[in-house]
Amino acid sequence: MLASHFSTYPLEAGCDEAGRGCLAGSVYAAAVILPEDYHNEGLNDSKQLSAHKRYRLREEIERDAIAWAIGIVTPQEIDRINILQASILAMHRALDQLQVRPEFIIVDGNKFFPYGTTPHQTIVKGDGKYESIAAASILAKTYRDDYMQKLHEEFPFYGWDHNAGYPTAQHREGIRQHGCSPYHRRSYKLLPEDEPTLF
């Protein structure tokens, strides 16, 4: 079972992002504040869960959380400021949207920029250790998957309905045949250097 809280602050927000390693699409982040003594045995790193379970847990998280929110940074912003800064900016934007101000922030990973004067702690593999980070990973993943599904309807040849923008063989073949979409991250190495591109 994951831990309820890292700090002694009751209003502790967990943050995580989704889509950092993708070739296309926005990066999404979520911030979640769970009740102090909350426990949900289903919570885990979103990558360890089936899609069906992630969406079921999303409903439970949104029902039970004190507050939750999503932050988004576009591909154009990613290209301008780099993916590390974009991932942290997405978390800050999620925190900005919370209806309740957190007293402490825990973040999956090892990089974070201070959010005002609110104390924070980065935690490597935190989405497998703390419930609020796991909850944030589930929200970020499912909302980003919904977004990529909509983009797939517009650009079906990249396979975004099942690869979510990650660099699979089908995705790279789609770039080879059709070039880039407006949603591709141009600062990324979209194809190997010896591959011709159409963009």
Image: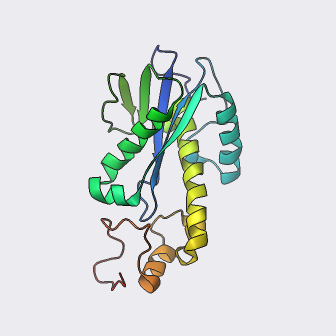
Q: Residue at x 39, y 60 (%)?
A: 75
Name the spot of residue 51 as percent of width and height, x first.
Answer: 66, 53
Residue 162 appearing in the image: no
Q: Residue at x 56, y 33 (%)?
A: 68
Answer with left or right where residue 89 lies relative to residue 151.
left
Q: Residue at x 41, y 81 (%)?
A: 179
Answer with left or right where residue 36 lies relative to residue 28.
right
Name the spot of residue 122 as percent of width and height, x first.
Answer: 37, 32
Relative to 72, residue 187 above or below = below
- The quarter of the image holding the C terminus is bottom left
Name the spot of residue 143 as percent of width and height, x first.
Answer: 58, 50
The quarter of the picture where residue 39 lies is top right
Relative to 155, residue 185 above or below = above
Q: Residue at x 62, y 28 (%)?
A: 65
Name the spot of residue 20 as percent of width and height, x first.
Answer: 41, 54
The coloring applied to the image is rainbow
Residue 15 appearing in the image: yes
